[in-house]
Each structure stands twice: as structure tokens, then as C-alpha cells.
Amino acid sequence: MIIFGIDPGLAISGYGVVNYIGNKFEVLEYGAVITNSCEEFPNRLKIIYDSYTELFEKYKPEAVSIEELFYNKNVKTAIAVAQARGVHLLAAVNQSIPLYEYTPLQIKQGIVGYGRAEKRQVQEMVKVILKLDEVPKPDDVADGLAAAICHAHSLKFANKFKIEKY
């Protein structure tokens, strides 16, 4: 099963594409979509949409796993990221790819086994689980891969627990 994980963002959106067969992972690609803050906001959204549409067409994932928005104290930033996240969702929906959403706590639980794990612990586990030589950078990329791994691990429990699918 090809799973596309996304850590949504406006400036940096990390992603990871994995093929999950049995209990084994094969990393197909990972990276980040980066938009320039000097660019007009609507153009930044278009860059995100076009980039993810192209990636979805290339890999034809069977599922998209995306991190839910974590609200911080800066409302203006949160609204901009929420709008960008909507573009991520739209790109997947327009490709008819099933969407699954996970909170940061669920992703940490699925990777480390502890929902309050530190960011560095999650990054190191992503490296170990995927047998990578180093932790993917920037952090958003490791988070995108973590979202994909979390969904793969959640598949084992799909019949026991509700998974948010859209």
C-alpha cells in the first residue's frame, strides 16, 4: 500500500511517500514543498496545490495521512496554515485519494508509543523504522514521514478503532 504522509504548512510542507507491504516499509520519496514569503498569498497556495497534485499523480497513493492543525497562540499564523492545509486536502480530494487525519498526539503515539514524546524522539524513530542513514531535514519532512508511518501502524487496528477518513 502506498501511503503519502503530509505535515501541512504554508512556508514549509513536509511529505513522505512510503510503500507499506506486510510489516515492512519502502521509502519511495520524501521532501518539502517550500513557498517564499515574498510571494503573494494566493500564489503560495497555488504552488502547494500544484506541487501536491503533481506528487499524487506521480505516486498514485492509496491513502493520504495528514496531521491535524496544531493551534498555537499566533492566530494570524494559524489561519494562514489552516488555509494551506485546506489546499493540501483539496489536492487529495481532487485525485479521489482517501484522506486520514491524525492529531500530533496520535502520530507520536503511533511512532514512539508515547503521545507526549519529544520531537527529537519522533525523528529518531522515523530514521530507525525506515532504515534511513540520517534524520530527514527539515523537521517538517520527518513529520510527513511520521504521518505516513502512523497510518500504516493504524491499519492494524482499523477494525478495532475508528480512523478518521474523509
Image (tube, rainbow, N blue to C red):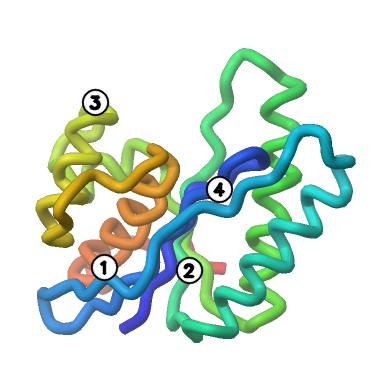
Farthest residue to the top: give it.
73
Query: Disc 4 on helix, strand or loop?
Result: strand
The residue at 69%/57% (across/down) is: 48
Q: CA distance from mark 3 to mark 1?
A: 21 Å
Disc 1 marks which residue?
Answer: 152
Q: In the image, is residue 20 above or below residue 29?
A: below
Tag 3: residue type?
Answer: Glu
The residue at 31%/51% (across/down) is: 146
Q: Earlier in the sequence, mark 2 or mark 4?
A: 4
Q: Nearer the viewer, mark 2 or mark 4?
A: 4
Query: Mark 4, residues whose alpha carbon is within 10 Å: few (<14), some, or many (≥20)?
Result: many
Q: CA distance from mark 2 to mark 1?
A: 11 Å
Query: Disc 2 on helix, strand or loop?
Result: strand
The quarter holding residue 17 reads bottom left
Disc 2 marks which residue?
Answer: 64
Q: CA distance from mark 2 to mark 4?
A: 14 Å
Q: Nearer the viewer, mark 4 or mark 1?
A: 4
Q: Earlier in the sequence, mark 3 or mark 1?
A: 3
Tag 4: residue type?
Answer: Ser
Residue 124 x, y percent position in the rendering = 16, 40
Q: In the image, is residue 157 above or below residue 82?
A: below
Query: Mark 2, residues whose alpha carbon is within 10 Å: few (<14), some, or many (≥20)?
Result: many
Check the picture and name the quadrant holding the N terminus: bottom left
The residue at 28%/78% (across/down) is: 19
Q: Earlier in the sequence, mark 4 or mark 3?
A: 4
Task: Indicate left or right for 61 with 142 as reference.
Answer: right
Q: Nearer the viewer, mark 4 or mark 3?
A: 4
Disc 3 marks which residue?
Answer: 118
